[in-house]
Image: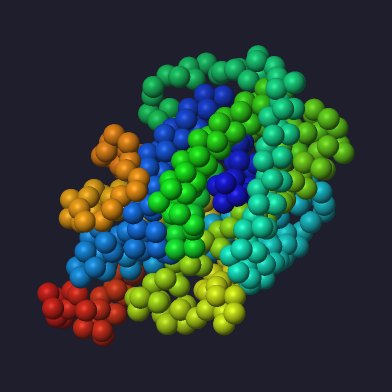
Amino acid sequence: MLNMVGVGPFLTVPLVIGAMGGPQAMIGWAAGALIALCDGLVWAELGAALPRSGGSYAYLLEGYGPATWGRLFSFLFLAQTVIAAPLTAASGAVGFAEYAGYLVPALSYGQSKAIAVAVCALSTWLLFRNIQAIGKISTLLTGLLLGTMGWIIVSGATHFNSKLAFDFPPQAFHLSNQFFLGLGAATLIAMYDYSGYFNVCLIGSEIKDPGRNIPRCILLSIVLLGACYTAMSLSIIGVLPWREVVQSQAVVSDFAQRVSGPIAARSMTILVLVAAFASVYTVLLGYSRVPHAAAVDGAFFSAFAKVHPTRHFPTFSVLALGAASAVACFFALATLIKALLVVQIMTQFVTQCLAVILIRQRRPDIQRPFSMWLYPVPALIASLGWIFILVSSGPWYVAAGLGFIAVAAVAFLYRAHRHRQWPRRILPSAV
């Protein structure tokens, strides 16, 4: 839940509403919740059946064959992880810096970026400890996060104005091309806010009773936060006119100011800053295990296999991703969000939806402590949802994603040639 929320909904409510031009943007939240739940069932089945650190690295390798295409798809996932982790963490850090601007309006561009970099550095330092200590910190941060959202929801409920909340513009539900483009943009942003429900799968080998706890963690997080996001968004637009919300740079702070005054607004801002920091922290925690797991298997750079001699966490991986996140802080938030989702959809999410079907067909010997409901419908719905979001992201981002895949594929072929691995025996002149 820490990873899913972060600073996302506190920043993106204006973006979601602006994408569709009115309260009908709540459909985007609902579409995001449906895709997240269907995709969450894919992750829940795979995470329970294959509880290994690295998540998709193991699932894609198993689904497409460790001796054939699984090597390519798992390598593409590893390559995007080295990019996705810094983009995700940086988005939380940049969001932290933007909200800090509410408390210190005179912040310059350089000062704002310095704050974002400092958030990444502090998160990296806090991760230099074992998983038990990390669990205690995460519990504290989760409590503060839920308190923040609860404050918004309760305050909104006691000051709710239905005329503001349901002030739909003319032809708000006219099913035109513009409507679907807006829905796609709103759903993309909503999925950024839902994204992170799979974080537990990245540390699968460190989870107690994974066959039971991984599915529970994923599905409960999606359902609980889906309800919270809906209630929170309605609370905000039931107090602030949606046209005002669209223009806000710190919408929950403006909301708190309208409801309870300036002291409450500053207090709310501090809680949002805590949530933003927590998201950076949990992203680096989960993603740092992915290249580590691959390096231990000999499929990635050996430096990522290094672990702390007494605390047993991947030292180099944590440091490398933490440093890359600091560098990514110099991109704009909107760019980070779109680039992140496009890369993940094209190299991980869609291929993994097919992988869960292939594993059932090719590896019936693998026990499934949890099986997705209505198989294979959720996997198919999730695939279509990801493709819809991808098309809505815009041609430049899709082209950039294809370029990334091409570069990563060349790197894979070069590495396969050097190590005499597949597909060298099929494509001997691959380099």
Q: Quadrant of the C terminus?
A: bottom left
Which residue sits furthest bottom? Answer: 418
Q: Is residue 227 left or right of residue 429?
A: right
Which residue is found at the position 42% from the left and 34% from the top? 34
Q: Is residue 170 above or below residue 310?
A: above
Residue located at (49% from left, 63% from top): 206
- Spot occupied by residue 320 in the image (x, y as percentages of width and height): 54, 74
Instruction: State the residue in front, 78 or 183.
Output: 78
Of the pair 145 and 175, the residue shown nearer to us: 145
Residue at image x 87%, y 39%?
Answer: 263
Q: Nearer the viewer, residue 165 or 157?
A: 157
Q: Is residue 314 above or below residue 210?
A: below
Depth check: give the residue in front, 238 or 283: 283
Report if residue 90 is visible in the image.
no
- Look at the picture and state if 108 lies above or below 37: below
User: Residue 283 at x, y = what percent?
Assistant: 55, 59
Q: How many marks?
A: 0
Left or right, 279 with respect to 257, comes to: left
Scheme of image coloration: rainbow
Q: Quadrant of residue 163?
A: top right
Identify the residue shown where x is 29% and y is 74%. 412
285 up-or-down from 141: above or below: below
Residue 228 picture quarter: top right
Place of residue 241 in the rendered image (x, y in percent of width and height, measured from the top left): 68, 24
